[in-house]
């Protein structure tokens, strides 16, 4: 497939300064795509998994867990960005100022994007970037005026070509084409990165915009769905697939990688949801079968409900959420310890942190918790 290179020349020396390019309009790319049986099978499997997941979510109310899944996406997205946060510190909101600023900015940008999506695309994109970037020196929310030369194989559009490239992208985004929405999402994701309209944060923003696209197109309407988990898991393959589109025009390989990512992420989500239900039912049965009074059991159920969505917590937080006194809540936490539902993270007498280990492990099954 053709690509559209632009060679930038140093005017003083006459030598090639670096390779830039103007990405071809996606309307043209779409017409040239040819798919084999593997890609078609991927789309069919995505449909089946999505239906299975929708039916599962109709049977169980997961609305209280949305924030946990946003944090999960932020965790993996920033891990691609090489910000290595510990899942426990994220869930407890105990992290240093720099980490807190970047992590919270990602969550704010995602919340804004999911709720405030509108079709003045340039303004919308700039507002999302303005929330995402915390360093004012990086000109948050402003279209970049300098070239990005970090990777000689993947240099984005030259600043003078950004507006033209964005206009083509916005036109394609607004176009009601008959292409499969998963294929369209893969093309939009790549094209945004090829343009990289902002000085920094383009990859993070692409993943936020992907979740927004899926939600607003009602492809995955019940929860924020992005591919951060998959892209982080196969980080090297992810980068190579993007680069091969850039230098070889290999859109087919990128799309297959993207479709496989949707399949793997759907399977991962379904597995997490099933684990959460299993943990909930197991612990509820344990409390029901205990010899405690009805009042104590009622309080334990309320505490269990709270720690299910706040798996790293302390007595003060539980007491505030349940509107119980500190001594009463301390007694409930002691029972939850005896039932091996909660465990203390440290031996501090004051502000002791408690972990709902089983729930944390269900969410971050491939991570370590130091």
Image (cartoon, rainbow, N blue to C red):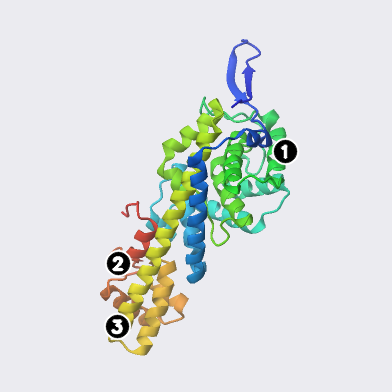
- For label 3, the SS is loop
| Picture layout, residue 32 above or below residue 340 | above
Query: What residue does disc 2 label?
Result: 344
> Of residues 326 and 292, which is closer to you in this image?
292
- For label 2, the SS is strand
| Picture layout, residue 347 above or below residue 41 | below
Horizontally, residue 71 falls left or right of residue 7, namely: left
> Residue at the location (45% across, 78% down)?
322
| Picture layout, residue 293 above or below residue 160 | below
Extreme residue toward the top, this view? 13
Percent of width and height locating residue 129: 62, 46
Q: Along the polypeptide, which appears first: circle 2 or circle 3?
A: 3
Q: Along the polypeptide, which appears first: circle 2 or circle 1?
A: 1
- For label 1, the SS is helix
Horizontally, residue 342 falls left or right of residue 4, namely: left
Q: Spatial distance from mark 2 to mark 3, Cα to Cα?
A: 24 Å
> Residue at the location (35% across, 55% down)?
365
Percent of width and height locating residue 72: 45, 55
> Of residues 262 and 158, which is closer to you in this image?
262
> Is mark 2 in CB contact (under 8 Å) with mark 1?
no
Query: What residue does disc 3 label?
Result: 289
Query: What residue does disc 1 label?
Result: 167
Extreme residue toward the front, this view? 37
Percent of width and height locating residue 33: 60, 35
Instruction: Using the rendered image of the protein, determine whether residue 135 is visible from the camera's viewpoint.
Output: no
| Residue 184 quadrant | top right
Q: Along the polypeptide, which appears first: circle 3 or circle 1?
A: 1
Local crowd at mark 2 within 10 Å, few (<14), some, or many (≥20)?
A: some
Quadrant of the image containing the C terminus: bottom left
> Residue at the location (69% across, 30% down)?
161
Local crowd at mark 3 within 10 Å, few (<14), some, or many (≥20)?
A: few
């Amino acid at each position: 497939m053709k690509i559209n290179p632009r060679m930038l020349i140093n005017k003083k020396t006459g030598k090639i300064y670096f390779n830039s390019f103007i990405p071809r309009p996606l309307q043209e790319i779409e017409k040239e795509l040819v798919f084999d049986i593997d890609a078609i099978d991927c789309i069919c499997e995505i449909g089946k998994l999505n239906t299975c997941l929708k039916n599962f979510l109709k049977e169980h109310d997961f609305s209280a867990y949305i924030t946990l899944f946003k944090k999960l996406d932020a965790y993996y997205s920033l891990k691609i960005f090489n910000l290595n946060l510990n899942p426990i510190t994220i869930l407890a909101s105990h992290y240093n100022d720099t980490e807190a600023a970047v992590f919270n900015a990602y969550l704010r940008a995602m919340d804004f994007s999911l709720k405030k999506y509108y079709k003045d695309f340039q303004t919308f994109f700039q507002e999302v970037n303005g929330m995402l970037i915390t360093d004012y020196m990086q000109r948050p929310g402003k279209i970049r005026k300098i070239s990005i030369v970090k990777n000689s194989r993947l240099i984005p559009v030259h600043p003078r070509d950004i507006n033209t490239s964005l206009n083509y992208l916005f036109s394609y985004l607004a176009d009601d084409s008959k292409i499969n929405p998963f294929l369209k999402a893969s093309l939009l994701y790549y094209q945004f990165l090829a343009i990289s309209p902002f000085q920094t944060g383009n990859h993070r923003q692409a993943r936020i915009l992907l979740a927004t696209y899926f939600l607003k197109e009602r492809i995955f309407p019940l929860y924020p769905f992005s591919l951060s988990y998959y892209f982080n898991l196969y980080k090297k393959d992810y980068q190579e697939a993007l680069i091969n589109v850039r230098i070889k025009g290999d859109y087919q390989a990128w799309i297959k990688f993207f479709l496989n990512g949707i399949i793997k992420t759907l399977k991962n989500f379904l597995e997490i949801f099933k684990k959460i239900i299993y943990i909930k039912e197991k612990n509820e049965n344990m409390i029901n079968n205990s010899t405690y009074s009805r009042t104590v059991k009622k309080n334990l159920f309320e505490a269990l409900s709270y720690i299910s969505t706040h798996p790293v917590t302390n007595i003060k937080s539980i007491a505030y959420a349940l509107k119980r006194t500190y001594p009463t809540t301390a007694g409930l936490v002691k029972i939850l310890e005896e039932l091996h539902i909660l465990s203390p993270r440290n031996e501090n007498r004051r502000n002791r942190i408690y972990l709902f280990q089983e729930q944390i492990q269900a969410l971050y099954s491939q991570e370590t918790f130091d």
